[in-house]
Amino acid sequence: MKINFLLPTPGQHPVGGYKVVYEYANGLVARGHEVTVTHQMILIPGATALRQRVRYAKSRLKRDWLPTDWFKVDPRVQMRLVLDMTPASLGRADALIATAWETAEIAVKQPASCGKKFYLIQHFEEWSGDRDRVLATWRLPLQKIVIADWLRQFAASEGQTVHYIPNGVDFSAFGTDVPALSRDPHTVIMLYHNFDWKGSCDGLAALRAVKASVPDLKVILFGVPAEPPDMEPWFEYHRLPSQVLLRSLYNRAAIFLSPSWAEGWPLPPAEAMLCSAATVLTDIGGHREYGIEGETTQYGQPRLSASLVPPLLRLLTDTPARVAQTRQAHRHITQFTWDVAVSRFDAALHN
């Protein structure tokens, strides 16, 4: 089967949704499919057509748009960068898979020769587009695949039938190297992001509040943007860490904090569980995919930094409870494999 995934931008920076697409591409090509991942070049507003073409040619030549520094794509996957997604640039395929609202609008306009049309929905992406326009893509005549039950429920409320396929976790990239009991019990790790809905400001506020009760608290931050302003001396920040470094950071931390207001099926907390870090998460649909209150995680409320303080203190000051939670979470998260997810995805494409 010839499969073409559509991504709305180049892939040089770590993005959870892109990682999911690359995992599916790797898994499907390993099953004998011919897989292409087509990336749309970001156009410069107001630039001439000549300038756009020159910039595109330079980027293709330098290959600086690829996820080389943060994800290993199987060499059998054809990675393409196009200036515009047209029938000619997309070519013939058996399955054309939109992966974001922007590419859903593109996919629906393509001729049948480009493939049977699917829409991999990983979130409700109103942060990157007008809400009504994003919602309209859910109603397009595309076969829809969602990664979380809350997305399945939302689709049902819109009268849409979908395939529900939870993500997997990469067991070759992440795992426990340092036993939970051997770690500094007062080290917390958090993904830092400058999107408001990621809740980083809430997380930082909660950690500053916790510091008053845990004077030797240490915080590890990692992310794509520049380090946050007003870095505390007890913070450390790792910008664009490699997968190897990220694994070591997870293994240093006693607790992973995720203060997001909304998530599809977030990978970092699941990766941290696999690395035996306890988790404090906001009680949202994406976290509920694998977060069981009091068993695999402790919950606070989104948009309420004060609600994150009690569960953080509970785990920071009760080592037996923290270690017990990490063991339960590790056992639970091992059911989410890419092998299972890819098999179900493959079946959906043949539906």
Image (spheres, grey):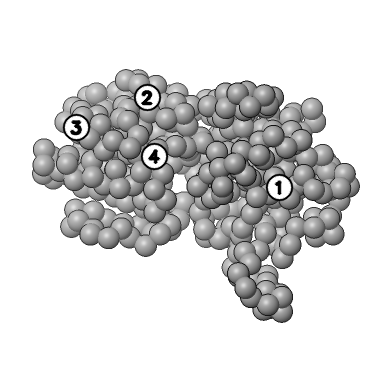
- Residue 296 is labelled as 2
Q: Residues within 10 Å of mark 4 (few under 14, many from 20)?
A: many
Q: Residues within 10 Å of mark 3 (few under 14, many from 20)?
A: some
Q: Label 2 vs label 4: CA separation?
A: 18 Å
Q: Amino acid at mark 2?
A: Thr
Q: Earlier in the sequence, mark 4 or mark 3?
A: 4
Image spot of residue 260 (x, y percent): 39, 39
Circle 3 or circle 1, nearest the eye: 1
Image spot of residue 237 (x, y percent): 31, 57
In the rendered view, tell whether residue 293 sits above or below residue 270. above
Q: Label 1 vs label 4: CA separation?
A: 27 Å
- Residue 260 is labelled as 4
Task: Mark yes or no: residue 177 visible.
Answer: no
Q: Label 4 vs label 3: CA separation?
A: 19 Å
Instruction: List the residue tagged with mark 1.
Output: 105
Circle 4 or circle 3, nearest the eye: 4
Task: Mark yes or no: residue 260 visible.
Answer: yes
